[in-house]
Amino acid sequence: MTTSSALLEVRELGHSYGRGPGALSILDGIGFEVEKNQIVSLVGPSGCGKTTLLYAISGLLRPSTGEVRLRGTPVRGVPAGLAMVFQDYSRSLYPWMSIERNVDFPLMANGVKKQERRERVSTCLEAVGLAGHGQKYPWQLSGGMQQRGAIARALACRPDVLLMDEPFASVDAQTREDLEDLVLSVRKRFDTTILFITHDIDESIYLSDKVIVLSKSPTFVQDQVDVRFSRERDQIGTRSLPEFGVMRAHIASLIRGAGAHVGGAMVNPA
Amino acid sequence: MAGVVLVLALGELVTRSGAVDPQYVPHVSTVLRRMVELCGDASFLSHTLDTVQAWLIGLALSVVAGVVLGFVVGSNRFVYKSFQALFDFVRPIPSVALIPLGMLVIGQGMQLKLALIVYAATWPMLYNIVSAIRSLDRIQQETARVFHIGRHARFLHIFLPSTLPHLATGIRVASPIALVLAISVEMLGGSRTGLGVWILDANTGAGRADLVFAGTAIAGILGALGNWLLAVAERRLLPWHPSHRSDSTR
Amino acid sequence: MTGTGSARVETLASMRLASSGWHFSRAFVTHVWVLIVAAIAWELIARSANLFYFPPLTTVLEHARQMWFSGPASSGWLTQAFMADVASSLLRVVLGLLVAVVLGVLAGTAIGLLPRLGDLVDPTLQFARSVPPVALVPIFMLLFGIGSEMRITLIAFTSVWPILLNTITGVRSVEPLYHATARLFRIGIRKRLVYIVLPASAPLILAGLRVSTALALIVMVLSEMVAATSGIGYRLMFEQQSCTLANMWACIELLGTSGYLLNAIVVLLEKRLLRWLPTPRE
């Protein structure tokens, strides 16, 4: 068995609900790798079990088949070293805690010392642009700022891998661009590795080093597209590059077609 | 259902174990037996009927009063605002505290029971009707008017359906209040007949603990039956309305 | 970069605060005129018609003062009678409520989190809370006599239901994503209970407490009216039997005021503990 150097490996991951002939197969033999410090996106048509996949990777859900390895160790239950930012921030951040407290809480619950907690909280809040807003309650902040808070909370845990489940879907376009750039800056500053789910193809190309294109349910990996731009990206510049359009077209056609399983063949990017 | 049986069985074990004095806490099986016996006892039944009559008639009257008053108060913003202060001041006075006054002014008997039940149970009815009227969806009304739906039809198909759930909640809250007032009046000497009188007699007279428990249990069943029937009726008649869960008593 | 949304929220909030100053005085007048008119009307009608059963407001207040507030300054002008009638009664209510809160929240949390236990216990709970509280007075008299313990136990037993049931509902309806987030951040079950489940259920629990408070007062008065040797309910019956109407009315007013105050305390508690709730737009 080849041991991979990748930080996160997903192998033959499958999941179905129920048993026997009525079983509903959601995921079917998904495999990919995420290297350290990469941003990898998962894109696919709506309803393709992206969230189920992320839950399986994070250990919140035990998959029916296959396995996930973090730093070479199989994932059983939620491992240390993972953090997640959910799409629905209003139901993920705790409304009765200030933003600061929300960021501090997982650290406190896991026994981090007070001094260190304070440092991490202020660093992370500052990194996401919420310095000075820590005392506010979530409802007092806009959607974009709440999501920044959620990102700060995830970052404060110093995770090996940061999982993001369509984090900017519920946010307006202007804010979304700011948040995308935030993700890039965070990766640079904290050396984080990020697995990012989105339905926005442009976003996936803009952010990632690799885009993994998923199929319709039962979901498998249709293609893995390497994004060879430099890591210094710019909303207007990068998106106007010709390769950007080519990749977008390719991925869009895969998703639009969202084909049936064709013997697991991988199509190389044009 | 299994849970109820379990609790009863547990109770039987405890009462038989000798941990409690059987003179004060009879065996569960004894109480159950008495309850069955009481259902055939003419005197007990007539007392109970008296209470139930007061309960139902009083409740019906308070529904009418609540609806009428609710309309008056809810339809006019000024009236509503003005009476809010009155509500806040008079409502905290427990209705049972007015029983002694009632006994002096009205005297004993059914009239006293009805008067107090109506006083106490009208408040929640009123509150709910007012909230129903104040929360009438303006957009629903406008839509109906745009489509030239006549007054009569509007009342039937828009107004009533949006008000009925509040009415149902009001009745559901008012019913146990009415029962409590009925029994309270009886226990305080405001009536010569009634379940409350019977239970108190059993307690102070011969000191028959089993009868006291049996009578109280039957009172509890009455209360539970009332709540259950109302809940079922609500679900049947208003299946389209999201079921009221929390905060049903405010 | 920073949300324009937050600036908008701040402006709205400050606007609301500014306008509420003006609104406050106007609302105050509309609210209070009824009370003033009612008070004056009571006074005039009672004086002129000389109704035996409805003494004038001023007479009632005077009797109330005599009975309870004419004591030595050292004890805050409170009389012995006040201590016997009012203080002890209210103390029992508070103690009974405390017991009810502790039991209700603990049991409610357990039942809410263990679905099988909930299924088992549900029908019994539904029955138990439908028992008219007044019907329990004879049983409690039988079991505990007519002293303080009986009253506190009775109050606790009857007030626990709204809190218990609301806690169960609250715990059961905690947003699943809160739990998923907590599991993801590897937050243990004990911390989850204290920092997530309880605060999330707090609005419902406090609403239950409000109902329980009103219920506790009623039960206290009832139990004192049926069988007691002291307390405000006892006083009420005593004055009624002595036909001293003004004193009796004073008791009624005192009860109303106590109920109002108790409710106000709970509302204050709610405001303090639920500061984090988004303020609703009117």
Image: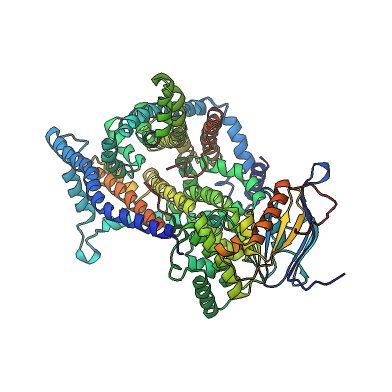
Count up the numbered dots.
Answer: 0
Q: Is residue A186 above or below residue B140?
A: below
Measured as percent of width and height from the top left, residue C97 is found at: 44, 54
- Picture quarter with the N terminus of chain B: top right
* Residue C244 visible in the current orientation: no
Q: Is residue B112 above or below residue A236?
A: above
Q: Nearer the viewer, residue C238 or B5?
A: B5
**Residue at 51% over, 49% down:** C166
- Quarter-wise, where is residue A11 in the image? bottom right
Q: Nearer the viewer, residue A181 or B91?
A: A181
Measured as percent of width and height from the top left, residue C7 is found at: 39, 60
Measured as percent of width and height from the top left, residue C195 is found at: 54, 63
* Residue A166 visible in the current orientation: yes
Measured as percent of width and height from the top left, residue B159 is found at: 42, 27
**Residue at 56% over, 78% down:** A113
Which residue occupies the extreme left position in the image?
C48
Which residue occupies the extreme right position in the image?
A1
> Is B54 situated left or right of B10 in this image?
left
Is the image coloured rainbow, by chain, by secondary structure, or in one colour?
Answer: rainbow
- Picture quarter with the C terminus of chain B: top left
- Quarter-wise, where is residue B65 in the image? top left
**Residue at 35% over, 32% down:** B70
> Is A178 situated left or right of A69 in this image?
left
Which residue occupies the extreme front position in the image?
A242
